[in-house]
Image (cartoon, rainbow, N blue to C red):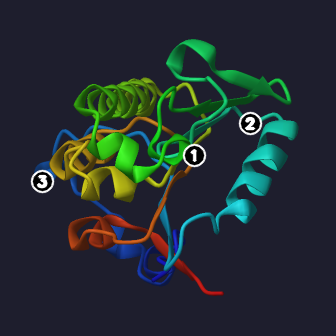
Amino acid sequence: MVISSSNNYSKINPDALKISSATKINLKRFKQNGQIQIYQSSYRGSYSSIIRDCLRNAALGKKVLLVQFMKGGVKQGVANQLKLCGNLTWVRSSHSYDQYHSEEIENNKNLEKSIHESTYELWNLCKKELLSGENDQIILDEIFLAIEMKIIDKDDLISTLENRNITGDVILTGTDIPKELLLMANQITQLRS
């Protein structure tokens, strides 16, 4: 689904936009937010094109935030964010499921708790950035897996996206995407192998 931002109706019917002074309503001017784009794939690790695009945008001078919720292994976390191209902030979880064997996590509740807390810490950073308006583009990589695992609340994500203050696009990636988020999207891209 792609929704165009252009609207020819007002050009064809200019009288539709005229408001008489008798019926004039006190209207507020709303800030234009960027699009919500969803990239869906049947398998993890298929989003190299998104990473390529965010590197290009940062090199072109746009301020970009890339958050990878389910990737780790590079001792990042919120405290150790990487800066690339001067404008790209790249953050991964300080503890992630992909760093350990599933048996290790199942047998160690403290490790599982640490992974959940690290992922939720990333989400809190994302919420702050989505509401701040300081970035031109924000990528939330594999956020739908964090929702599926009940680390991040779906309604919290929806509310944050509805109240976002970003002029650029918000890109969300994942495999199983809740219907409510599909309905919010301006663009949905399904990646196939």
Q: Secondary structure at mark 1?
A: loop
* Residue type, numbered disc 3: Thr
Residue topped by disc 2: 62
Mark 2, Cα crowd under 10 Å, few <14 / some 14-19 / many 20+, is: some
Q: Residue at x 47, y 38 (%)?
A: 96
Mark 1, Cα crowd under 10 Å, few <14 / some 14-19 / many 20+, is: many
155 lies left or right of 117:
left
Q: Is residue 43 above or below residue 166?
A: below
Rendered location of residue 32, percent (x, y): 45, 46
* Residue type, numbered disc 1: Gly
Rendered location of residue 103, percent (x, y): 36, 49
> Is residue 169 or residue 127 the one in the foreground?
127
Q: Is residue 178 above or below residue 108?
A: below
What mark, if any, has residue 168 been given in the picture? 1
* Proximity of marks 1 and 3: CB atoms separated by less than 8 Å: no
Labels 1 and 3: the sequence-earlier one: 3
Q: CA distance from mark 1 to mark 2?
A: 9 Å
Residue topped by disc 3: 23
Point out the residue furthest to the top here: 79
Q: Is residue 134 visible?
A: yes
Q: Is residue 187 above or below residue 140?
A: below
Number of disc labels:
3
Q: Residue at x 42, y 30 (%)?
A: 122
> Is residue 115 or residue 134 the one in the foreground?
115
